[in-house]
Image (tube, helix red, strand yellow):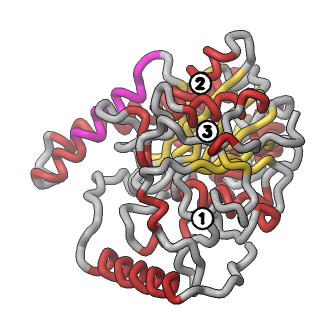
Amino acid sequence: MTPVSRRLSPVSLRALLALAVLCVMVSTTGWTAVRPPAAEGARAAAVAAWMTGSAGLRQLPAPTSPPAAISHFFASLTAAQRARLAERYPLVVGNLDGVSPTLRYRANRLALAEQQTRARRLAHSGELNFSGQRQASELATRYASLLTPGRQILAFDPTGSGLVAEVFGDLSTARRVAVVVPGSDTDVLDFESANKPYEAPVGMGQALYEAERREAPDAHTAVIAWAGYTAPVGLGLDASTGTLAERGAPRLESLLASLPRRATVSLFCHSYGSVLCGVAAPHLPHGRVRDLAVFGSPGMRADRVSDLRTTAHVWAARDSGDWISDVPYVEFAGLGHGADPVSAAFGARVLSAAGADGHSGYFAPGSTSLADFADIALGRYGSVVCRSGASCTTGLR
């Protein structure tokens, strides 16, 4: 990762100092989001059992094995053996990059059903206080939604605030795959929203998939709403440093390595998710990840596009009403995330955000940003609308 080396103006230094003070206040005065009662240890126990298990006389591979090794192992099993592993170790199989999407969907339905039963029990037990019971009830409701017939849950881990990913379309046959990487305050409970659907990962992914289908009904596409990393909560220190992005980047890289080799991939990274994508950028599969789009970004921990060391086309967008424009675009002593991705000096291809709604409304129906995202995902660069009418598609085919 290339450190930001430009000189800081007095204004930037004052803004950064204010940010540091805010971060200290947030981290020490109890401004923390209420967390649901976690199924602590559930996946750890499942992994421990998996490591002592076998398929026939063969030892099971470590869950941390590369996707290619996982894929090779599962391909060597019979259909009955694969099904038994999914039934016995759903919290492991459902999160293994390299396992077929269909088997992961099945495993995650089993894991979700188990956790739903647990949450329902806790919601009516004396083990928790009123607040804990309410949170357990909310979790049970969320799990019930994720278990709706037809939903394709690619990953599910109830540990902590929870990790989850969902697929729209047929991932096994897709020729183009888009991955939506959300930002702060994303967990199992916030994975979808009835009140503001396009501000949550599910709504983002679904809106993008539907926009692609309208543009190209016969195209083989899939979209993954990927809340597969531990995101920051609020505006605390975690949101101001790259620590969680650095921890989450290998998980994103593993997902990308497991996608169908024939498919080209586009990343759409929102807010803190763009920090994660910036950290992961040098390790993206060259040639397969065709596009990297960031929006509402606080920075990518780089000075310029060349610092990302990626062959992907880098795009950026920001709505005029997005409060993220007020953050100090600097990186100093680990605080801040570097240069502004929509600045001319950064060198990204800057998209129009007309019709977007503030920081979280880039997937709003009818917005130019959503139409641009769909065109990028489909490789239809000639239809992309750039900011201020300027060309941002020169040299693209």
Q: Which residue is mark 3?
A: 93
Where does the C terminus fall, quadrant-wise? top right
Which mark is in front, 1 or 2? 1
x 24%, y 44%: residue:
136
- Name the secondary structure under disc 3: helix
Q: Is residue 309 above or below residue 223?
A: below
Which residue is more in the foreground, 373 or 121? 373
| Span colored in magenta | 137-149
Tell me if mark 3 has few (under 14), some (14-19) or many (20+) residues whose alpha carbon lies within 10 angstroms of its own.
many
x 56%, y 71%: residue:
329
Residue 216, position as x, y percentages in the image: 70, 15
Which mark is in front, 2 or 3? 2
Pick out the residue farthest to the front: 389
Pick out the residue farthest to the top: 218
* Marks 1 and 2 in Cβ contact (< 8 Å): no
Q: Is residue 172 above or below residue 353?
A: above
Q: CA distance from mark 3 to mark 1?
A: 35 Å
Q: Which residue is mark 2?
A: 209
Left or right? Give the position of 106 relative to 191: right
Which residue is more in the foreground, 303 or 388? 388
Q: CA distance from mark 1 to mark 2?
A: 26 Å
Q: Which residue is mark 1?
A: 299
Q: Earlier in the sequence, mark 2 or mark 3?
A: 3
Residue 210, position as x, y percentages in the image: 56, 20
Left or right? Give the position of 132 relative to 145: left
Quadrant of residue 152 in the image? Answer: top right
Q: Earlier in the sequence, mark 1 or mark 2?
A: 2
- Name the secondary structure under disc 1: loop
